[in-house]
Amino acid sequence: MRNNQSSEDDKLISRSDWQYISVLLGIGFLTRMIFFSQIYLISIDGAFQYIPVAKLFAWGEYKEALSQLQLPLYPYLVAVFSKITGNFELSGQIISFAS
């Protein structure tokens, strides 16, 4: 019969596994920070699809914004962050970075 106390062997993820995961997450975070600071552009779908819808949200034209083909969450978040940053493109990069 097994002892009720947990042992090192009973853990699903060991301490060394957590260290590897932390290193990989750190590398991914640093890579994103480097690209975020060096590249100031967004993809074609962002420039021609999401930002115009975000501008509709920012201008208060919610009915028109919701009638577009894009799902509304990302453009809405871009509109909210654009109130803080003053820049739709930077707002999109921040949201993409955070996701």
Image (cartoon, rainbow, N blue to C red):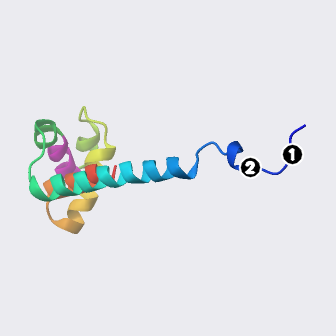
Front-most of residues 74 and 37: 37
Residue at the extreme top: 69
Q: Is residue 19 left or right of residue 39?
A: right
Q: What label sits on residue 3 in the rendered view? A: 1
Estimate how packed mark 2 is, as few (under 14), some (14 to 19) or many (20 or more) residues with alpha carbons within 10 Å.
few
Name the residue tied to disc 2.
Answer: 7
Q: Are marks 2 and 1 in contact (CB under 8 Å)?
A: yes
Residue at left 86%, top 40%?
Answer: 2
* Amino acid type for the residue under numbered disc 1: Asn
Horizontal and vertical percent for residue 66? 29, 40
Q: What label sits on residue 59 in the rendered view? A: none
Q: Main secondary structure of the magenta part?
A: helix
Q: Is residue 30 left or right of residue 24?
A: left
User: Does the segment drawn in magenta span residue 54?
Assistant: yes
Horizontal and vertical percent for residue 72? 31, 42
Residue at left 12%, top 40%?
Answer: 43
User: Does the segment drawn in magenta span residue 25?
Assistant: no
Estimate how packed mark 1 is, as few (under 14), some (14 to 19) or many (20 or more) residues with alpha carbons within 10 Å.
few
Task: Give the quadrant of the N terminus.
Answer: top right
Horizontal and vertical percent for residue 58? 21, 56
The region drawn magenta spans: 50-57
